[in-house]
Amino acid sequence: MADIVEQESMDQIEDTQKGKFLTFCMGNEFYGIEIKYVTEIIGLQPITEIPEMPEYIKGIINLRGKIIPVMDVRLRFRKPFREYDDRTCIVVIEIKEVSIGLIVDSVSEVMSIPDEEIVAPPSVTKEGNKYIKGIGKVGSDVKLLLDSDKLLNETDLDDITSNI
Amino acid sequence: MSNQYINEPMLDLFIFESMQLIEQMELLIISNEKSSSYDSDAINEIFRIMHTIKGSSAMMLYNNISTLAHSMEDLFFVLREDKPQNVDYSELSDLVLEGLDFIKVEIAKIRNGDEADGDASALIKSLRVFHATIKGQDLSAKNQNLADGAVSHENHTPEKQQYYIGKVRTETTSLRNTFQATLRFEQDCGMENLRAFGVVNDLGDLVEEYYHMPEDLDHEDSARVISEQGFTLFLKTDRSLEEIHRVLIQTFSLKDLQLTQVENSELFNDLHKERKILLEDSSVKVPTSSGRDHVANDYEEKEIHSAATQQSIISVSVAKLDQLMDLVGEMVIAEAMVTQNPDLKGLELNNFEKAARQLRKITSELQDTVMSVRMVPLAGTFQKMNRTVRDMCKKLNKEVQLLLIGQETEVDKNIIEHISDPLMHLIRNSIDHGIEMPDEREAQRKPRLGTITLEAKNVGGDVLIIIRDDGEGFSKDRILAKAREKGLIQGSEEEVTDKEIYNLVFLPGFSTNENVTEFSGRGVGMDVVVKNIEAVGGAIAADSVPGKGTTITLKIPLTLAIIDGMNIKVGDARYTIPTTAIKESFRPKMTEVIVDPDDNEMMMVRGQCFPILRLHDIYHVQTEVTHFTDGIIIMVEQDNKTLCIFADELIGQQQVVVKALPTYIRNTKKVRGLAGCTLLGDGSISLILDIGGLMIRQSA
């Protein structure tokens, strides 16, 4: 019984979060990430580097006793590194019980993008669209909607190590 | 609910474990049924669960459960190995769930103190039909077997069949043997009269006539008499001494058993005559309804009795202990945050210092206490193995003794739970594959009695558990052949060292035993062993001398939670070295440093030469301290190897709570030389160095 009730309340939460995206800015583009994945947004924290990680994994931070890794999304997308400033934020997301912080230039707002305003990304190149799930149209702007699952779980070929 | 009756600890454990496994398996089946196909992980997992249930229920002599589990295991073995296409998964789920229900009912019976007397043969039959279907075998050929209705497994001993025969046996026996048995129970085991009653009950079907002393088992005084003088039984039966012995020796809490054949049965006859009139109405049908009532009463008494004596012991769920541990860990950090607060720097605070010292003392005591609560001696786990050894020996007709060394070694409760299964598997393997048959041993000029040594000892922050047997050792050729067959070795044999070959046996599905037996031979045991040992951050290694025996060494950490660490600084990074590994630290002089032609740096200390490892170098940390004379050398030792670690400076010693690196990091890459991370007093993160890993890096 309890499971059913829990499931229902979960469904409800998912319902209210559906179609809502947290948008953030990197360089000239705006990106969106589904709000249901976002746990919180924090300012930049001292980061402890972990040796031998790919460049885009900046290290780990102490989030109130919980240790989570942080990833520089710029470097993940092979954009040039940009010095962190006071606008730089860490967006903490959690997918399938794995928490990770995403370092972005700045966050802008939470907005609703209905399904009909989202189009599939054009298949220009294989590389560029790997982490883009769709393109959301908001007025005259476009937001690139991230596939968070892929962002976390798909590692580049050269990162795959023997232990996997 | 399990407190309703107080069962034997072993029985409790069996019930608890089996119920847990069944629950786990049900979840697996149900979640897989939805997708209408079983993925290979689930099949492996179910296979393992059935394997464990089969083993443990056979050990507890619940043959119906064990047989059923065996059939299910067979089924999943086919699924795992042959990966058949034509499987009706919903039918499979139905069958398996039905089987699980049966086991659950049996376990419920056992928990309530009843006989687990359900008949699983119908279920087994349908399982076998299904088994045959997915194997794609000709059903008609199989039907022959099924018509027999025999639960024919090569590994089901005649003993079991006798059990069934015994139930329907007619009274045509010749009563040729008379035995006298004296049983003594462990001291303070309590309820001796009830135990004796149980013994008589167990013998029920095997014995034609019997007489026992003291006569009245229902009376409370008899418990005292039995505990003082032992329980004496006179039996008349057509069974052999061996069979009776086998039944009697399985009595719980049995300390001593003397079973002799009485050639001249006059004594028996005299007693018999006297007693006959009294016995006539109940004959040998021991479990009468009044008997049951007494059992129930006795259980109540027992409950009261144990409630009085065990008042000072409570059982707490490990989850709660874990939570407490976490909290204490956080508190240790918080304490450091307060007492080493940067705001206090340079201030003269006498009273604060005093109070802080007091706080530090209490926290460290609290922490020690919590740790000690979690520490459990290995004795319990080790002793469980005696049973395994004895049962195995009986079934395989081998002669093996088990030597236990260092049982008092204490290990964290979490770890104990993870090593009990592996130990059992390893010991089974040793007996089944390692120790030869007694005659064979004699031919090889070894003592008939094989020896398995189970030894535990503390080595630094680890506990070593060594399982040593004096059997035939691994067959290198067979392992190599099998490895080639499975495509595990590509290169030439010369490139692989003996140790590497032996350690191949830990790979999943690797079994060189051709015949699958009830105990081993499916390569699933080693799989479980490695999985469980790795789960607690341990390591396993095997070594073997052909003809002399095999040694398997498990290295497990003492605890997972808190270690004493030395914090060091390299550039901006902080690292923590377990204090147990540190031998000394010193400022080096340039004259002591040697550089060989390959640019390997070494340090000469008191006439001995040790390699130097520059932390900033291997972890690419920016630091200004690159000259040895500016920094500090920390000499660490592990596994008899010594390494000099070069760092910028020491920060200080602190107890740290070990936290695992985030899953994402671990999935991305396993960094050699990092054991985890921890939070320092100022809230910053320090990486815990794994000395063993660093040494591998250094030598690589």
Image: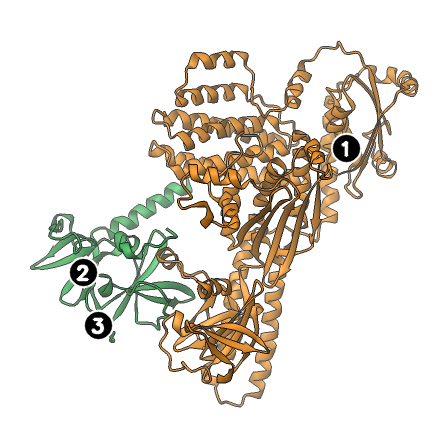
Give the labeled residue for mark 2. Answer: A31
Indicate the chain on which mark 2 is placed: A
* Visual hue assigned to chain A: green
Q: Which mark lies nearer to you, 3 or 2?
A: 3
Quadrant of residue B27 within the rendered picture: top left
Determine the CA span between mark 3 and mark 1. Answer: 80 Å
The numbered mark, 3 or 2, whose residue comes first in the sequence reads: 2
Q: Is residue B490 left or right of residue B436?
A: left
**Residue A82 disc label:** 3
Answer few, some or many: residues within 10 Å of disc 3's Cα (few below 14, many 20 plus, some between 14 and 19): few
Q: Which mark lies nearer to you, 3 or 1?
A: 3
**Residue B308 vertical position relative to residue B210 in the rendered view, above or below:** below
Determine the CA span between mark 1 and mark 2. Answer: 75 Å
Indicate the chain on which mark 1 is placed: B
**Residue B276 vertical position relative to residue A26 in the rendered view, above or below:** above
Quadrant for the C terminus of chain B, please. Answer: bottom left
Where residue B656 appears, as percent x and y from the top left, is 51, 68
| Three-letter code for the amino acid on which mark 3 is drawn | Arg
**Residue B194 disc label:** 1
Quadrant of residue A53 within the rendered picture: bottom left
